[in-house]
Image: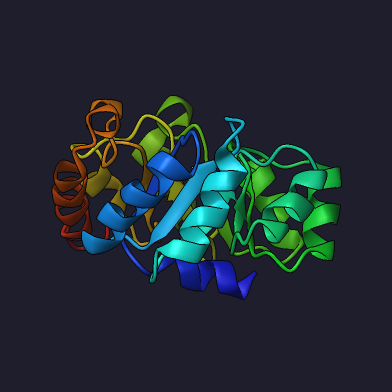
């Protein structure tokens, strides 16, 4: 649980990636790392996702690649075998929490309500994913949690882009933001790795204003 907090502190943005396999995963990861975003979340939404994780882990120095959209307990085992260094889920269940406790992978469970955040805090979790952020109250929701739940830190994801991210990053209880905008599908299809690196640099350089 402490290790996931360390991972969230590496950069202000965690790119959320949907990859077909090694062929697009490796160059995308290289471009993101070169642009200053080393922590990458590969969603388990494609048949080639774990192949991409294995390839990035083996071929991209500096990449800290984890898996997202973890919705089944067995995915902790397959992700760990593929070389992932953390796991993220959009929500959480009793079965997922049990699997996480048996796994060596640092785990970022998702919440969408105050009660869910409190329940995970009771279990010792201090870093949580807030998803889907824009649909569930966004910046205002997280700002409201600062006083009653001051020990929790969040990675909001869902509907956030480069224009909205700074408002989240200005909050004292936001460790980082997850989003797919640094890796547009058009750039991946075109093999425009320079564009992805430039978007990564811009995301890396998002500055926090005074906490609000």
- As drawn, is 48 to the left or to the right of 175? right
- As drawn, is 105 to the left or to the right of 127? right
- Can the viewer see residue 66 in this picture? no
Which residue is at 48% across, 68% downward?
7
Residue 107: x percent and y percent? 65, 58
Which residue is at 86% across, 54% downward?
98
> Toward which corner of the image does residue 205 lie, by quadrant?
bottom left
Residue 136 versus residue 71: which sits nearer the camera? 71
- As drawn, is 112 to the left or to the right of 13? right
Which residue is at 41% across, 60% downward?
39
- Residue 17, compared with residue 78, is above or below; it is above
Residue 187 versus residue 101: which sits nearer the camera? 187
Q: In which quarter of the image is the N terminus?
A: bottom right
Which residue is at 29% across, 27% downward?
189
Residue 21 versus residue 64: which sits nearer the camera? 21
- Residue 194, compared with residue 170, is above or below; it is above
Total tally of numbered discs in the picture: 0
> Toward which corner of the image does residue 54 lie, by quadrant?
bottom right
- Can the viewer see residue 106 in this picture? yes
Q: Quadrant of the C terminus?
A: bottom left
- As drawn, is 195 to the left or to the right of 10? left
Residue 164: x percent and y percent? 24, 38
Residue 131: x percent and y percent? 52, 36
Residue 73: x percent and y percent? 81, 45
Q: What's the colour scheme?
A: rainbow
């Amino acid at each position: 649980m402490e290790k996931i907090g360390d991972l969230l502190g590496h950069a202000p943005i965690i790119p959320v990636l949907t990859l077909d396999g090694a062929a697009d995963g490796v160059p995308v990861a290289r471009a993101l790392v070169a642009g200053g975003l080393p922590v990458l979340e590969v969603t388990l939404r494609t048949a080639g996702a774990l192949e991409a994780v294995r390839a990035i882990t083996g071929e991209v120095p500096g990449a800290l690649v984890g898996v997202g959209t973890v919705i089944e307990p067995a995915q902790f085992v397959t992700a760990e075998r593929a070389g992932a260094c953390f796991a993220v889920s959009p929500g959480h269940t009793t079965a997922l929490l049990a699997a996480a406790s048996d796994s060596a992978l640092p785990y970022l469970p998702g919440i969408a309500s105050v009660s869910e955040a409190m329940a995970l805090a009771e279990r010792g979790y201090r870093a949580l994913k807030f998803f889907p952020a824009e649909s569930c109250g966004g910046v205002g929701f997280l700002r409201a949690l600062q006083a009653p739940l001051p020990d929790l830190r969040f990675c909001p994801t869902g509907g956030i882009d480069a224009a909205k991210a700074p408002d989240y990053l200005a909050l004292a209880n936001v460790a980082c933001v997850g989003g797919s905008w640094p890796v547009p599908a058009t750039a991946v299809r075109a093999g425009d790795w320079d564009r992805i690196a430039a978007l990564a640099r811009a995301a890396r350089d998002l500055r926090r204003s005074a906490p609000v």
